Image (tube, coloured by chain):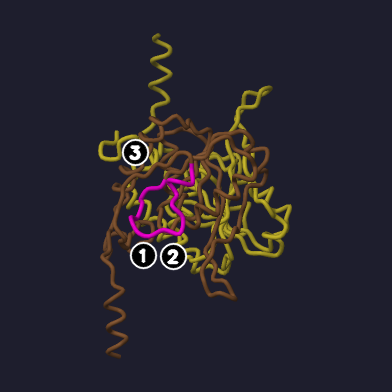
Chain colours: A yellow, B brown
Amino acid sequence: MAEFGKTLYNTVMEKRFYSYNDIHRTVKILADKVMASPLKPEFMIAIGGGGFIPARILRTYLDIPIFTVNIVLYEGKQTGEKGPQITQWLDKPDELLENRRVLIVDEVDDSGATVAFCKEHLSQHNPSEIGLAVLHRKNKPKKVELPQLVEHYFCGEELGDEWICYPWDALDIDNRN
Amino acid sequence: MAEFGKTLYNTVMEKRFYSYNDIHRTVKILADKVMASPLKPEFMIAIGGGGFIPARILRTYLDIPIFTVNIVLYEGKQTGEKGPQITQWLDKPDELLENRRVLIVDEVDDSGATVAFCKEHLSQHNPSEIGLAVLHRKNKPKKVELPQLVEHYFCGEELGDEWICYPWDALDIDNRN
C-alpha cells in the first residue's frame, strides 16, 4: 500500500481547467495564425474525437469544409504499448486529397504519435501541402516532433507537461474539479 | 426601399442565444434520456458539421464511439431548392452498420430533411435499430416528422420556430449579439 501510495503521489500532475470560452478564444488565435500563413487550406481533416470541437469552431473563422477521420489508441497485444489505429477513414481519399492543401486539426500535441500516424496515411494520397492546427502543445519529450513533420504547424497555446481538463469531458459542467 | 424594409421587418425572428454551458447541460439531459431507453446504442453517427460538438459531449456520458458523415445543403441547379448532399460517407458502411444499434446525432430538428436523408442512406446497410438525438427541436411545419421516422427519438429541448444562435458560430465569444 505504501508503494502504491507513493506511485500515486509521484504521478499526480497539476490539472489545468479550460472553459469552453477559453477554448473558443484559443481557436480564434489559431484561426488568425492559419489565415496569416501561406498554406491557404482548402479543407480541414479533423482527427476524432479530440479534433471535432476545435474543427467546428475553426470553421466559423476559416469557412472551409471539415472532413473527419477517427483514430483511437489501442493497446498492442504483444507489446502492451498503446499505438494509434484507424477506426474510420476518408471514404474517397484519392479524390479528396490529390494535389490539395490540407489542414489537420486535433486538440493537443502531446506525444505526437497520433498526428504523425494520421499524416503518414494522408500523405499516401499526395496532397500538395499539409498543415496541422492544435489547440495546445505540451512542451515535453516527444515520440515525434510535429513542427518538423508538417510543412505548416499552428498551435494556439504552449504548455508544460500538464494534465489538461477540457470542458467537454466534464460530467457536471457547473462544478468541475 | 420601403418594400425592402418591410420584407426585412417581416422576416426578423427572435434570436435565442445559447452559451456552451447551456449546450453541455442540454446534452446531459439528452444523455439521460438515451440511457433510460431500450435502444442501448453501440455507437453514434454524428452528422457534420452540426452534430460534431453535441456528439463529442454526448460521448462523455454514453462512452460509445463516434463515427461521422458529412452532409451539406446544396441548391439544386434546376429547382433552386436546397437539398441535402453527402460530402463524406462511412468508409465501411456494411461492416459497421449490419445488425447494429445506431444513434444518429445532430444539433437541431428543423425541417427534418437532412436527418431523413441520412437515415434513408444508413438504412440501406441494415442496422437493427436507429435512434436520433438532437439538442433542439423546432415546433414548426416539417418536411419530415422525425419522431415518426426513427424507432427512438430523443430531444434535449423543444422550441418554437426561433433563430437559434449556437456558441460555436460566434466570431467574438465574449460579445455576442
Both labels 2 and 1 in a single chain: no
Q: Which mark is residue A117?
A: none
Residue A141 is situated, as x and y percent measured from the top left of the image, at 54, 39
Q: Which residues are magenta?
A: B134-150
N-term-proximal mark, 1 vs 3: 3
Amino acid marked by disc 2: Tyr
Identify the image quadrant of the N terminus of chain A: top left
Both labels 2 and 3 in a single chain: no
Q: Residue at x 62, y 33 (%)?
A: B99
To which residue does mark 1 refer?
Answer: B171
Residue B158 is situated, as x and y percent measured from the top left of the image, at 31, 50
Locate residue B126: give its quadrant. Answer: top right
Mark 2 vs mark 3, CA separation in Å:
28 Å
Q: Which mark is residue B28?
A: 3
Q: Say left or right for A24 vs B16.
A: right
Contact, CB < 8 Å: mark 2 with mark 1?
yes
Locate residue A57: give its quadrant. Answer: bottom left
Amino acid marked by disc 1: Leu
A20 relative to B126, above or below:
below
Mark 1 vs mark 3, CA separation in Å:
26 Å
Specify whether residue B139 is painted magenta: yes
To which residue does mark 2 refer?
Answer: A61
Disc 1 crowd rating (10 Å Cα; few below 14, some 14-19, many 20+) is some
Residue A11 is situated, as x and y percent measured from the top left of the image, at 42, 25
Amino acid marked by disc 3: Lys
B105 relative to A75, above or below:
below
Q: Nearer the viewer, residue A108 or B175?
A: B175
